[in-house]
Amino acid sequence: MTDSLAATTPTAISENLQEFLLSRTKQAWEPDVDLFASGVVSSMFAMELVVYVEKTFDVMVLGEDLAVDNFRTVNRMTDLVLRLSENSGV
């Protein structure tokens, strides 16, 4: 399972999320930019982010983890994935 471990390094997660955002918004995003404040994230796109994070990183985002603050920036999404990966034993 070295591939899944490599995919959960902070750098790999951040780069993956930034590539996803670039593909969907057609613009690059710095890891600490507030995506909600920028207006790029609608409620529909927020749900797409949740689904993307779950499927791509094989984690479940439930309950308190569904908070907007966890998806506000690439850095926060990276932290969320790392925390959820640790909790799932990956």
Image (cartoon, rainbow, N blue to C red):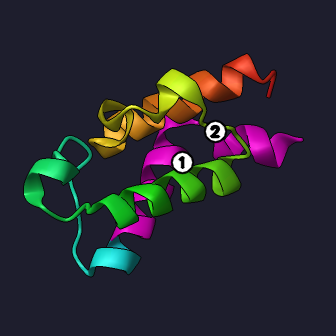
Left/right of residue 41 with respect to residue 58 in the rendered view: left
In the image, residue 30 above or below residue 25:
above
* First to last magenta residue range: 1-21
At horizontal 37% and vertical 77% (from top left) the residue drawn is 24
Q: Quadrant of the N terminus?
A: top right
The image shows residue 84 at horizontal and vertical percentages of: 63, 26
In reply to whether residue 6 is colored magenta, the answer given is yes
Q: Badge 1 is on which residue?
A: 12
Q: Residue at x 51, y 51 (%)?
A: 50
**Numbered badge on residue 79:** none
Whether residue 81 is situated above or below residue 89 in the rendered picture: below
Tell me the distance, in whole angstroms, between the alpha carbons under discs 1 and 2.
6 Å
- Which corner quadrant of the image does residue 85 belong to? top right
Q: Quadrant of residue 81?
A: top right
Q: Nearer the viewer, residue 24 or 43?
A: 43
Q: Amino acid at mark 2?
A: Thr
Q: Is residue 42 left or right of residue 33?
A: right
Amino acid, disc 1:
Ala
The residue positioned 43% from the left and 47% from the top of the image is 14
Secondary structure, mark 1, is helix
The image position of residue 10, as x and y in percent, is 50, 35
Give residue 8's mark: 2
Q: Is residue 43 magenta?
A: no
Q: Above or below — where is 69 with respect to 38? A: above
- Find residue 65 and report its horizontal and vertical position in percent: 50, 27
Is there CB contact under 8 Å for labels 1 and 2?
yes
Q: Residues within 10 Å of mark 1 (few under 14, many from 20)?
A: some
| Outermost residue to the left | 38
